[in-house]
Each structure stands twice: as C-alpha cells, then as structure tokens.
C-alpha cells in the first residue's frame, strides 16, 4: 500500500472543488466523500494501514467509513458545511443507531470553512463512548424526526448556548466540553490508541 495514495486523492479533489467554485458549482454530497479521504490520509500518515470503500475486509469492517484492519478499528467520518440559519455546523447520526448499535469505535467530525467550502476548518476526534449522549434525539431542533440525533458545533460556547436557548432541547455535556475545551478533540488521533 502506497503511503501517499490518499494524499494524492485529497490534493486532486481539492483542485476539482476549486474549479467547481470558479464555475459556480457546489455539491455537498462530494464533500462527505472528500472528508473520508481526508481522514484516511491523516490516519495513514500515522503509519496505520487504512481501508476505505470497497477495500474494507473483515467482520463488521463495513459498519463505518474507514477500517484499520491490523487494529480492527472502525472509524466513522462526519462532516458539515456552515449552516447559516443555525450559524454553526452539525454532524448527523440519524436516529442514533450508529451509536446505540456500536457501529464505530472512533468518529471524526470535520466542519468545513465558511469562506472556502472545501477547506477543512477543524478536525475533531471522538471515541464512541464520548458520543453516547448524542443517541438521545432532540426533536424540537430537528428538521426531520428521523434525523434528530445531532452533534452541534458553533465555534465558541457563548454562541452555542445562545442558539440552544431558542429550543426546548437540552445542551449536551459533550457539546459543552467541545466548545469549552476544543483542544481535547482537535486532531486527537491518540484516541485510536485507546482501542489497541
């Protein structure tokens, strides 16, 4: 396996996004796949063997977006463009079954930049256990009832807290901690080692 293959994919996809932007074309569906390749590249740089897409082999390997076959670790990737009505980013876990059925070991959340929508704004790394709370749906803020398990990020706590005041749903401890202590999650790839 070439150590540079995901780096090359990320580079060429970014070039494609820049060309799309120059021609007034935007497709958020492509960004989610780009996020997967971006995370695969970052993990591969740490000397892990990485499988993505149809490469994934082994029991339960296809439960998440990325699989580390030697460690048998499943990595789920979530990404979000900046959403102006909410003035923030959100990672969707649907009805929460990915969490309740333990479909992943590690989750990486990528908020994309406001100005250049293809640029990675942050890279937050969570263990499955840290996100368990998100499996509790918050229906008042959800656009659809089957998509009420959301991880919210607004950049800083005051903005997040002000946004939450307009809803009946509670603030989650993991979101509070993410906003107050982002360094605990920012590119914290050591969380992969917790499963070794």
Image (tube, grey):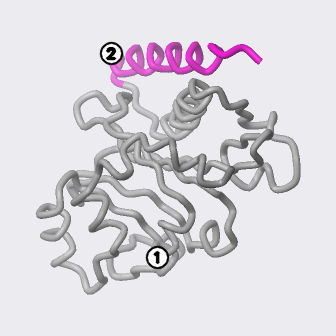
Q: Quadrant of residue 119?
A: top left
Element under label 2? helix
- Kindly report the secondary structure that dominates the magenta region of the rendered protein: helix
Residue annotated with mark 1: 133
Residue 160 part of the magenta segment: no
Residue 120, x across and y down, in percent: 37, 33
- Report which residue position mark 2 lands on: 22
Q: Is residue 195 left or right of residue 157?
A: right
Query: What residue is drawn where x is 39% and y is 26%?
Result: 25
Magenta-tinted stretch: 1-24
Quadrant holding the N terminus: top right
Q: Quadrant of residue 160?
A: bottom left
Horizontal and vertical percent position of residue 100: 63, 75
Residue appearing at x 57%, y 24% in the figure: 45
Q: Is residue 12 magenta?
A: yes
* In the displayed structure image, the side of residue 162 where residue 54 appears, left or right: right
Q: Which one is in front, 143 or 72?
A: 72
Number of residues whose C-alpha sits closer than 10 Å to that of mark 2, classed few (under 14), some (14–19) or many (20 or more): few
Above or below, 49 against 128 in this view is above
Residue nearest the observer in this picture, 59 or 192: 192
The residue at 60%/47% (across/down) is 193
| Badge 1 vs badge 2, beta-carbon distance below 8 Å | no
Horizontal side, residue 73 vs residue 39: left or right: right
Please tell me in which quadrant of the rendered image residue 39 appears.
top right
The residue lying furthest to the bottom in this view is 168
Label 1 or label 2, whichever lies nearer to me, is 1
């Amino acid at each position: 396996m070439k150590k540079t293959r995901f780096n090359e994919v990320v580079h060429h996809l970014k070039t494609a996004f820049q060309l799309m932007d120059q021609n007034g074309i935007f497709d958020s569906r492509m960004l989610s796949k780009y996020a997967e390749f971006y995370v695969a590249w970052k993990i591969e740089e740490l000397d892990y063997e990485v499988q993505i897409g149809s490469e994934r082999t082994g029991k339960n390997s296809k439960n998440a977006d990325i699989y580390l076959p030697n460690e048998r670790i499943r990595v789920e990737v979530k990404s979000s463009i900046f959403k102006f009505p909410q003035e923030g980013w959100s990672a969707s876990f649907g009805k929460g079954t990915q969490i309740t059925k333990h479909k992943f070991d590690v989750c990486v959340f990528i908020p994309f930049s406001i100005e250049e929508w293809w640029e990675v704004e942050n890279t937050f790394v969570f263990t499955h256990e840290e996100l368990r709370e998100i499996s509790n749906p918050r229906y008042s803020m959800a656009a659809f009832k089957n998509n009420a398990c959301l991880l919210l990020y607004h950049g800083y706590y005051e903005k997040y807290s002000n946004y939450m005041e307009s809803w009946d749903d509670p603030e989650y401890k993991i979101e509070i901690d993410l906003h107050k202590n982002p360094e605990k999650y920012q590119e914290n790839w050591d969380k992969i080692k917790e499963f070794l």
